[in-house]
Amino acid sequence: MSEPIDKFDHKEIDAKWQKRWREAELFKVTEDATGPKSYVLDMFPYPSGAGISVGHCRNYIPSDCYARFMRMRGNNVLHPMGWDAFGQPAETEAIKRGSHPRETVPKYVANYKRQLNLVGISFDWSREFNSSEPDYYKWTQWIFLLLYKRGLAYRSMAPANWCPQEKTVLANEEVQGGLCWRCGSRVEKRDLPQWFLKITDYAERLLHDLDGLEWSEGLKMMQRNWIGRSEGVEFEMKVDGTEHSFRVFTTRIDTVFGMTFCVFAPEHPLVVRITTDERRAEVEVYAKRAQALSEIDRMATEREKSGVFTGAYAINPANGARVPIWVADYVLMGYGTGAIMAVPGHDERDFEFAKKYGLEIRRVIADNSSLADVPLEKAEPAYGVMVNAGEYSGVACDEGQRRLGEWFEAQRTGERKVNYRLRDWLISRQRYWGCPIPMIHCPSCGMVPVPDTDLPVLLPDVDNYQPTGTGESPLAAIPEFINVNCPSCGGAARRETDTMAGSACSSWYFLRYADPKNDQAAFDPAKAAYWLPVDCYVGGTEHAVGHLLYARFWTKVLQDAGYITFGEPFLKLMNQGSVLGLTPFRKPRENETLSVGQEGILVRPEDVPSIPQDQVFWRWERMSKSKGNVVTPDEMVEDFGADSLRIYELFVAPFEMNIQWSSEGMQGANRFLNRVWRAVLGAKFDREWRSKLEQPFDGKAKSLRQKTHSSLAKVYEDISGFRFNTAVAAMMEWLNELQDFQSSGGSSAAESEAIECFVRALSPMAPHLADEMWERLGFSGFLLGDRLIDPDPAVAKADTVTIAVQVNGKLRSTLEVPAETVGPELERLALADQKVVQHTDGLTVRKVIVVPGRLVNIVAS
């Protein structure tokens, strides 16, 4: 043990310990273990052909470090993994490869699992499941039926992206700049009957319950904005000279006298009825072009506003004014009523539109009445008093809102109400590879749910799953699947052929991990009560207004139905930063349209040589399979080892920050671990060091003990707070102190204490190397089954501290003082310091601010 070892063999050590962990079923967990439970969960991944990248490791490695740490602190840790295998990504990948999802998904799952084990992730594989397996999606169907029976699922017409060339429905992500991602054809909107879930019924609870969650404020704000609660007045407006009327909603009814035009969404059903003959052709062309754009493009604030006049006018009910009705693509049918009252004097978007088309801009709000006739150079949405508002002129805005709300209600032409931006969840997909929707269409009985006893409705195992060309799911072309007897009347009926979006299966998977082998229920309520809610959930912010919102909704429905007792699935949520890779793009060609914010057309790296170099540019983009900029963990583990990759991912930056991938950074991580290897195994380790701590320590030994215990406290605190980069930094500083002690020729119980504590603390970060060193130090078993050593606060406390001394906020000196030095003495010492005296000479000290243990700031003038 006293012989120094220059370098560890990462290939031999990685393989050795991964095999031992697997044979010992080290990561398997049960409900009857001692200690508090801790449920640590990574977001449900979908497996695809390229496998995982070092970008995926950006959340798997830190969450694994945290899970291992919690277990070594005595917690009963559930850390499971499964596969979100249904949905568009898996189907698209299979189509691209000329294969079938039922064949590709198991292969991809096996590769993902191999890679995760390669990096040493401590998943409990006994709880693994796949969302495309019938024994899982049976319960997805059961929850859908629960939603239907509770009035939360319905079928309605809704527009879908339609590619006329390929004759198929496209997902939003398959539409790029209004064009089909495969053939480049202009995408159209086609109305299809589709299934929705009434998430809007839970809007208020989804909003209110955010307050109690340990999520970042930024992510909670994203959900609040998406839910979009607003209080205002919804009122009716008549179309002049017709029997038609429409409704608008506004949060600022006090500005109603400033309405100078109205705007309809191109999809509004009244557009075709009220447009005059001389305006019809222009309106139809505009509406068709607008409907081909994505909602993201239409709502982009930086995009120039456009619109066309319908030739029709509406009557402002507040003053009887006749206002023109326009059509504009920045108004969406799915938001509010699909029509807005435009007040350009006090809304930036309306102001921009009015200036472009020469429409009237009227001031109806001002700081005081004397400003009523001052022209507006820009929209002024501030509060003050109402002006140019008839009998309401001079009335404060808040009072005007109250009185006008009461007036509209008295007239029975409007009412005060709460609106939400949130829309019902469109869950239908016209695709093969998804969970079949368990509904039956009967000519006599109407819509009939499949009985629970007949679940699961199996996805038919067919070779041809290509699009039908009609807009229907490929299931519609399978007679043996479609034709069924009605469970209510027994007559001939047809199955629903839409499948559910993949987000359905990921809206409850965290519950299934609590009881994954149950064939009688989705989960045992007692096991769910033991493990849930999830204590620490790890994943990206890109799921803020999709998966996270849907999972919260399904959890609340299951709570209301009495199956669980909690209403929030994820108590603590940690969002990792992205790993960026250099990615090639080309400039667009003449016939190509870029979406808002898009700078170029993504190209595959292998295609770059065939493109003129003046047409290619490179940019840092998030690492992903679709962008062809992936670096795999296989490459890094082969060259440097699993633990070097783990240390690099933990250390390179704060958890929540993006990083630009650098393979060179791996070399530094590897050098650090080799220094650890030499320091630990090159020492004269004494396993009986605890019995020798009674002897007095001084000098370097005392300093090493202080560093050991202060470092333990720092590392534990930082891992608990997901500050992995500073935890690794503390380990590096600790190693420096240990090596400095060793280079002095010292040897004592302090060194052995430092070595054992260090190896234990390293284990969550670099488990392969830690277990290998543990065994070579003469111990048996696995560190994960052992406990971390608690730091001793008395030993961790430094004898002296360094105090920064500032004069008027600028550092002028430092003081080395006993740690227990109190405020008045720190003030005295600071004022007597010669460097401070030089910078205060001729000035009067006005104030001295003391932060004990850290800082003295002298304010002088």
Image (cartoon, rainbow, N blue to C red):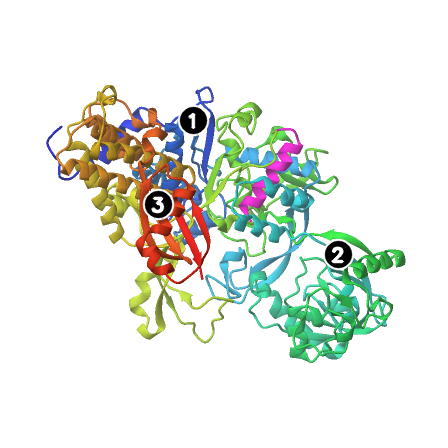
Indicate the position of residue 474 as horizontal and vertical percent values.
54, 49
Indicate the position of residue 85 as horizontal and vertical percent values.
46, 42
Front disc: 1 or 3: 3
Decide: few, some or many residues near mark 3? Use Cα within 10 Å; few <14, some 14-19, many ≥20: many
Q: 535 above or below 188?
A: above
Closer-to-camera residue (7/491): 7
The outermost residue toward the left is 3
Classify residue 335 as left or right of residue 40.
right
Mark 3 vs 2, N-terminal side: 2
Q: Name the residue under label 1.
A: 75
Amino acid found under the numbered disc labelled 3: Asn
Closer-to-camera residue (482/595): 595
Mark 1 vs 2, N-terminal side: 1
Decide: few, some or many residues near mark 2? Use Cα within 10 Å; few <14, some 14-19, many ≥20: some
Mark 1 vs 3, N-terminal side: 1
Amino acid found under the numbered disc labelled 1: Asn
Judged from the image, the secondary structure of the residue bearing numbered disc 1 is loop
Q: Name the residue under label 3.
A: 725
Q: Residue 167: in sight, yes or no?
A: yes
Residue 550 within the segment the image draws in magenta: yes
Q: Mark 2 points at which residue?
A: 232
Amino acid found under the numbered disc labelled 2: Gly
Decide: few, some or many residues near mark 1? Use Cα within 10 Å; few <14, some 14-19, many ≥20: some
Residue 619 within the segment the image draws in magenta: no
Quarter of the image with the N terminus in it: top left
Judged from the image, the secondary structure of the residue bearing numbered disc 2 is strand
The outermost residue toward the right is 410
Q: What stretch is highlighted in magenta?
A: 546-563
Residue sitting at 56 percent across and 52 percent down?
Answer: 222
Closer-to-camera residue (378/328): 378
